[in-house]
Image: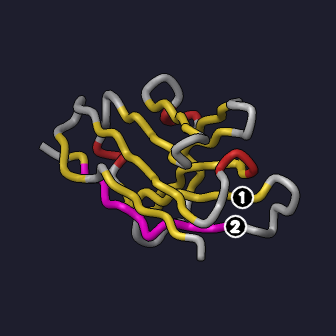
């Protein structure tokens, strides 16, 4: 059974930092494109950052230079370091894994709330 345990969300002031972590079980992250998405009420889920099996990363423009995605295949974890946080980064953040050989195979975490507010 595939399970993701997300942690690290919370309340932070503008300009602050948070580190999200996603621990996966039931899959080997080395075979997956791992990503973080976020969603706010009434809006579609948005891809924030992703990392391929060989470590290539991509980011939505709005977080480029502020967020860093990383993964540890040995530990089956993927992290999102978020710096210089802004109120518009407030959202529920979800961990996602998509199988490299079959993109239709996709797994989601339960989500963790990030709130940026003074």
Q: Which element type, helix, strand or loop, lies under badge 1?
A: strand
Pick whichever, 37 or 7, lies toward us: 7
Identify the secondary structure beneath mark 2.
Answer: strand
Viewer-side residue, 61 vs 47: 47
Quadrant hosting residue 16: top left
Q: Is residue 33 left or right of residue 48?
A: right
Q: Residue furthest left?
A: 118
Q: Residue furthest bottom?
A: 1
Q: Quadrant of the C terminus?
A: top left
Q: CA distance from mark 2 to mark 1?
A: 4 Å
Q: In terms of secondary structure, what is the magenta stretch mainly? A: strand
Question: Looking at the image, which residue is at 17% across and 39% down?
Answer: 13
- Residue at the right extreme, as displayed: 101
The residue tagged 2 is 106
Q: Position of residue 89 (x, y in %)?
A: 37, 46
Indicate the quadrant where residue 45 lies. bottom right
Magenta stretch contains residue 107: yes
Q: Quadrant of the N terminus?
A: bottom right
Q: Which residue is mark 1?
A: 98
Looking at the picture, how far across and down is residue 34, in whole percent? 63, 49
- Residue stretch rendered in magenta on the structure: 106-115
Nearest to the observer: residue 9 or residue 15: 9
């Amino acid at each position: 059974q595939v399970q993701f345990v997300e942690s690290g969300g919370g309340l932070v002031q503008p300009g602050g930092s948070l580190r999200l972590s996603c621990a996966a079980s039931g899959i080997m992250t080395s075979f997956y494109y791992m990503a973080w998405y976020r969603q706010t009420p009434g809006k579609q889920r948005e891809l924030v950052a992703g990392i391929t099996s060989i470590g290539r990363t991509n980011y939505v423009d709005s977080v480029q230079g502020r967020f860093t995605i990383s993964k540890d295949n040995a530990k089956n974890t993927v992290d999102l370091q978020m710096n210089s946080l802004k109120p518009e980064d407030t959202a529920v953040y979800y961990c996602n894994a998509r199988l490299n050989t079959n993109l239709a195979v996709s797994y989601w975490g339960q989500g963790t709330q990030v709130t940026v507010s003074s």
